[in-house]
Every structure is written in structure tokens, then in C-alpha cells.
Amino acid sequence: MTKTMQPLGTRLRAVGIALALAIVLVPAVVGTKSAEAQTFKVLYSFTGGADGGEPLAGLVRDAAGNLYGTTLYGGSGGPYGNGVVFELDNAGTETVLYTFTGGTDGGFPYAGLVRDAAGNLYGTTSGGGAYGEGTVFMLDKTGTETVLYSFCSQANCTDGACPMAGLLLDAAGNLYGTTESGGSSNCYLGCGIVFMLDNTGTETVLYSFTGAEGDGEYPVAGLVRDAAGNLYGTTWRGGNLKHNCGMGPGCGTAFMLDEAGKETVLHSFGSKADGAYPYAGLVRDAAGNLYGTTGYGGDSGLGTAFRLDKTGNETVLHSFRGTRADGAYPEAGFVRDSKGNLYGTTEGGGFNRCDGSCGVVFKLDKTGKETVLYRFTGGSDGEGPSAGLVRDAKGNLYGTAYWGGAGGQGTVFKLTP
């Protein structure tokens, strides 16, 4: 199977969805923040060498304030490296916890990490492993890696292949996730699966997407779980096959999977205004409403933020316009505060100095009013934030930018709104 080594939005644009933004050169600036944004600080700039490069995923934070994440490239092995797992302390000092080789240990981690109470880190790699189709791994506190599962161990990869999303960890130590491909052979390279991995490393395929009318295909986002054990997620293709948003029939779904493995498609995207291609995951509030983004569609075709109620009725909270004062192409999901405000990133929008514009950090209030908290310049601050944010108790936001920075290979940043 062919691995994709770019942000998914970049990949979609490369295969035929044209940018709707004009490319305009502007003078180099430090970055623009709204009246709400007090400080923006680059905590670390990657060089693309042993320290890693091009962090595509978000971060996880421990009680001491240390940040943990992955980079897609850098490290060692191959012309670009196979990626690393890193820790960043409060002083901004990076420690590379593990360097992937691209062999049986895995390579090219698209997704971020989840951390257990003992400090072990769990994640996925999109490549490598015993069969070359990705892994689920654990890193202990000493940086020792254990490959918990290698995908495509079964004929035709019915156990899944190429996981691009992070993991969900339950109280019993079970891990839940998705793979973009493998599973049902109805789609090119397989339609993707939802899986569970127990604490002995035994995989159970909970659902194999079919790509048939009304079903989804190609899940690239992680999952969220409710108290009853139901799982919620998205697929970036499939659903209503009468809709074609530029990449063939089906513009994506939001789905629920119950404990028995029964799937319910909560919403099929593609009626233009409601959005298209939801390749970010969902967040859920106490009332059972789900919030997410679509990378395309909406009033300007540049993506949406949406809410789904418990019956699957969608409300578009915001349609991105790609202007200087707005974002475009949201690739990541949200973090939500106690007041119901949503915080996220867009890969494009803001300054047009970058190829396709540089991206923003934004806030949406409960009415859908957007405030752009920061516009990336493509300079030392970074560009193209493709991952979600993590928020501390004081409301500070932490994230990654895929490109830019002093070393040109991406940044870790802190934003105090």
C-alpha cells in the first residue's frame, strides 16, 4: 500500500481540489494577534535532523507541564528520517524519547500520543512494523519501545492498515483506534476499520467500513467514547454517494458504533453548505452533542465547524472564508472549555504569504462567533498548523505548526488568550 506523507488537506488539494485563495506576498512580520491574545511564544523549532521535523500531530501534557508529541519526519533512516517521539520541558528543552527506524518498530507517525497514569505513551505509526503497514506502540518512561501490534498480519489486511489517527485509552487499558485502509476490499486498498487492542496486544476489529451507500470509508481521525461505551468518529469519504465534492462519490460521515459493533451513521456530508471531508475527530459535551470540522465545503468551500445533536441534526457553526481575518481548511478537531467555547486551528487562511496562506488559531463561542487568536506568518513562528490544541488549567493553548520556524521544519507553540 502507498503511504501518504503529507497533511491530508495538502494531499486532497494535490489530487484535484484547487485552492480558493489568492497568493499575495506580504512583508515579513512577527505575527498578528487579536485584542484577546496576550502572548504567542515559540517553545521549540525543529531542524529536521535528529530532533525531528514536521510535527503533524498535536500534543499531550502531563501534570508538571511537560509536552509530548511526534514528528512525521526527522530522526534517522532514509533521506528524510522516519520520525521521532519527543518531550519538551517547561524550559523548552527537547528530549528525543525514541527515534523510529522504519523497520519493525514502525515509521512516520501521523498521530499524537495518549499517556497513562504510569507515564507510558501510546501511539501509532502509519508505516513500518512487521508487515510494513503500520503499528500500535508503547513507550515506557525509559524510552523503551514495545510494538503492541503490527497491521496487515491477516490476508488482504482485513485487520486494517495504515493508521493515521491517535488512540483512545479506557480505564481497563484497552486501546481504540482507526486505520485509513485495510478491512473490506470494496474500496481501493480497503475501506478502513475501527479496532480495539486489549492489554495483551490482541486486536478485535469492531467494524469494517464498506464504502457502500450510506456507509463511510477511510477513517483518518481518532475516536471519542461515552459512558455507555459507544464510540463516535468520522470518515472522510463515503456516506451519501449521490454527493460528489470533488474526490468522487461520498463526502464523508459522522458515525456511532455501539458495544455490539453496530454502526449508525449520524450524518452524511455533502450538501455543500454542511461541509465536506471531515478528517478531524469529534468532541462531545455533557448533553451528548458532537462538535467537529470539515476540511472543505461550507459557504466558501473552505471548510466548516459544525455541531451534531443526539439525533444527528447538524448545525453549521461557522463557514471559513480564507480571508486575512479568518481561517481555511481546518484539519483538526476542537478542544472545549467549561463555558462551551471551542478552540481550533486551520491549515490555511490568515496571512497569504505562505503557499495557500499560513493558518490561524481561532476560538468559536457558543453562538458560532469566531475570534482569530493568532495568524501565522510563515516565519519563525511557523505555518500550516494541522493539529488540534491542548489547553491547561489557566487557559493557555499549546500546539504545533507543521512547517516554518527557525529551522524551517515546524514549531511547538504556546498561546495565552
Image (spheres, helix red, strand yellow):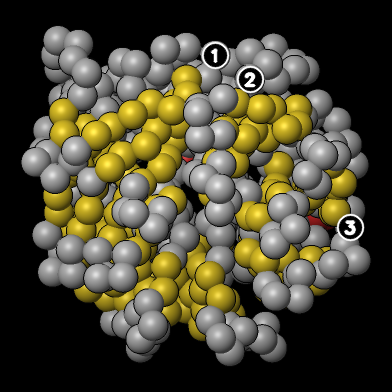
Q: Position of residue 97 (x, y in %)?
A: 73, 33
122 or 357: nearer the eye?
A: 122
Does label 3 or label 2 sit earlier along the sequence? 2
Q: Position of residue 246 (x, y in %)?
A: 35, 47
Q: Is residue 85 left or right of residue 142?
A: left
328 versus 94 height, above or below = below
Disc 3 is placed on an element classified as: loop
Instruction: Examine the image and state in which quarter residue 394 appears.
Output: bottom left
Neighbor class of circle 2 (other Cα within 10 Å; few <14, some 14-19, many 20+) is many
Instruction: Examine the image and state in which quarter residue 84 appears.
Output: top right
152 or 53: nearer the eye?
A: 53
Tell me the CA gap for discs 3 and 1: 38 Å
Give the labeled residue for mark 3. 154
Disc 1 is placed on an element classified as: loop
Q: Is residue 198 left or right of residue 253?
A: right
251 versus 22 height, above or below = below
Disc 2 is placed on an element classified as: loop
Q: At x 47% / y 12%, what residue is drawn? A: 407
Residue type at mark 3?
Gln
360 versus 309 height, above or below = above
**Res. 232 visible in picture:** yes
Which quarter shows the N terminus?
top right
**Res. 25 visible in picture:** no
Residue type at mark 2?
Asp
236 or 201: nearer the eye?
A: 201
- The residue mark sitting in front, 3 or 2, is 2
Give the labeled residue for mark 1. 47
Q: Position of residue 283 (x, y in %)?
A: 42, 68
Q: What is the number of the mark on residue 51?
A: 2
- The residue mark sitting in front, 3 or 1, is 1
